[in-house]
Image (cartoon, grey):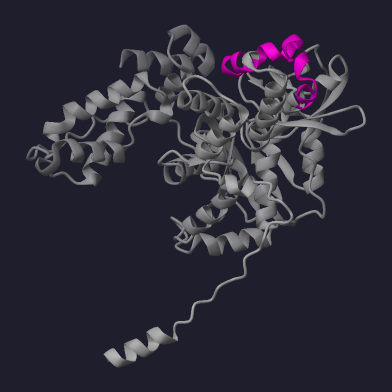
Amino acid sequence: MTQIKHIKKERFDKGKSIRSIARETGHDFRTVKKYIEKSDFNEPAKRKSGRPSKLDPYKETIDTWLLEDKLTKTKQRHTAKKVYDRLRNEYRDNFDVSERTVRAYVAAKKKEIYGVVEGFLPLDHPPGEAQIDFGDVVFYEKGQKVEGHELVISFPYSNGGYPQLLKGENQECLFTGMIAIFEHMKKVPAVIWFDNLSAAVAGINGQERTLTERFERFALHYGFEARFCNPDSGHEKGNVENKVGYSRRNFFVPVPEFEDIEEYNRGLFAVAEKDMQRDHYKKRRLISCLLEEDKAAMLPLPDTSFEVAKWQKAKVNKVGKIKFETNTYSTSPAVAGREVWVKADAHSVEILDEDYCSIIKHKRLYGKNLESMNWYPYLTTLAKRPNALKYSGFYRELPDPWQDYLESCDHEGKKSSLKILLKILEESDMETANRSLKECQANSNGKANSDGILLSYYRLTQKSIADNLDLPANLITMSEYTPDLTSYDLLFKEMI
């Protein structure tokens, strides 16, 4: 109380500013401000003592969980519902406490642990506006684990929204996700709120933002007004912040597994729209109906789509590879030492020659110091000159099983085996080619040949070899035989 009296005296008697008092006393600015404005010094009302709460035996457990949460990431901490579910699961029939009681205790305990969170004024959102944000999501594409992202566009007026899975947060991913959602709705939000993501904002100077040129072009192309939150003010787009978490919990649990990310994203629209067949939490009308009001206030879709891909020149090294961003991509031995064009969108990297003719296309790599190798252009050249195989720079980059096998082949064996390898790579990948070779060797006491490798490949991929047989043109064609079943009909009539 002495400190409070001192603070009030410094403010009202000496006229000092709140900031200077905070510096002198060592108290936080907000603490000083609270005591200056405080006018009610009544003692806090004492709680009436009553019977013990049913939750009392479990409070120590809850406290332990919540304190342990301080050591984990914010997004992986216990929610009140998760606490309730864990208690029910761990104590089963012995746990007889309502979810409301658990929620009240968890909320109070979190305030005690983390302090009082600053409140914010509710914002009024007119129809036709949208908010955008990224969130972290894990998924599996073709059996490979991807630490990816979800791009979510939400519409605060209706509380509707659409997610799209992407492998990065770069400009190409941002544009790809937005365009997919625009084209699905056949509408463009009139105003879109963004965080200060690097894909859109090149720099911040106070309240002024310098936007990247391509983002400005993108916004002009679709006609929307881009607005940006203040730094460290995620609450200004709280609707989409909540929607990111909601989508992750409801659409991506269990962890999604699929073969093609673009096809999976197209299916997400139906999932989101099914979810919107529920009442708005406050307006008590279907979200899907409110979304139609949102759309009515939006802009029409332009006639042409924006070109997402970025173009960049690169120099091919002596073994036919280029560096793009932090990763390496193969091209073709035919362009070694020359300049090529790199065309990169959210999902792929295409390499073109100086005349803009496509050389090869790769899945875009997300990460650092990764490599994508497409052997097809290399092996097409080598299949014509198999004796040059051993002396080529990229021969040494072939997987060891294939190097050893080709080393043991004669001229014709190399030629036929390279053709088989080409066929496998045209339809599948090098991993499948390795498995086919190893299975063939295992089934023939370590020896292999091109025909055996092909049979193993068909067996592994469950393809029919008959579909690939070259049949002679003079093969006799059998006429179709239609059985006569009338005698069976007579027999059944006699039995009846």
Is residue 374 in view from this perspective? no
The residue that appears at 74% across and 44% down in the rendered structure is: 225
Is residue 464 in view from this perspective? yes
The residue that appears at 63% across and 56% down in the rendered structure is: 127
- Which residue, as the protein is rendered here, is positioned at the far left? 51
Kindly indicate the quadrant of the structure image that contains residue 370: top right
Kindly indicate the quadrant of the structure image that contains residue 389: top right
* Nearer-the-camera pick, 170 or 42: 170
**Percent position (x, y) of residue 353?**
87, 28
Q: Would you say the magenta stretch is mainly helix, strand or loop?
A: helix
Give, as a single range, the part of the protein colored magenta.
380-406
Kindly indicate the quadrant of the structure image that contains residue 351: top right
**Percent position (x, y) of residue 183?**
70, 53
**Percent position (x, y) of residue 214?**
80, 33
Quarter of the figure that contains the N terminus: top left
Q: Is residue 343 magenta?
A: no
The residue that appears at 29% across and 21% down in the rendered structure is: 68
* Nearer-the-camera pick, 37 or 192: 192
Task: State how many labels appear.
Answer: 0
Quarter of the figure that contains the C terminus: bottom left
* Nearer-the-camera pick, 355 or 64: 355
**Percent position (x, y) of residue 15?**
53, 17
Q: Is residue 393 magenta?
A: yes
* Nearer-the-camera pick, 124 or 179: 179
Side of 397 where 41 appears, left or right: left
- Which residue, as the protein is rendered here, is positioned at the far right? 355
The residue that appears at 49% across and 19% down in the rendered structure is: 446
Side of 263 where 414 appears, left or right: right
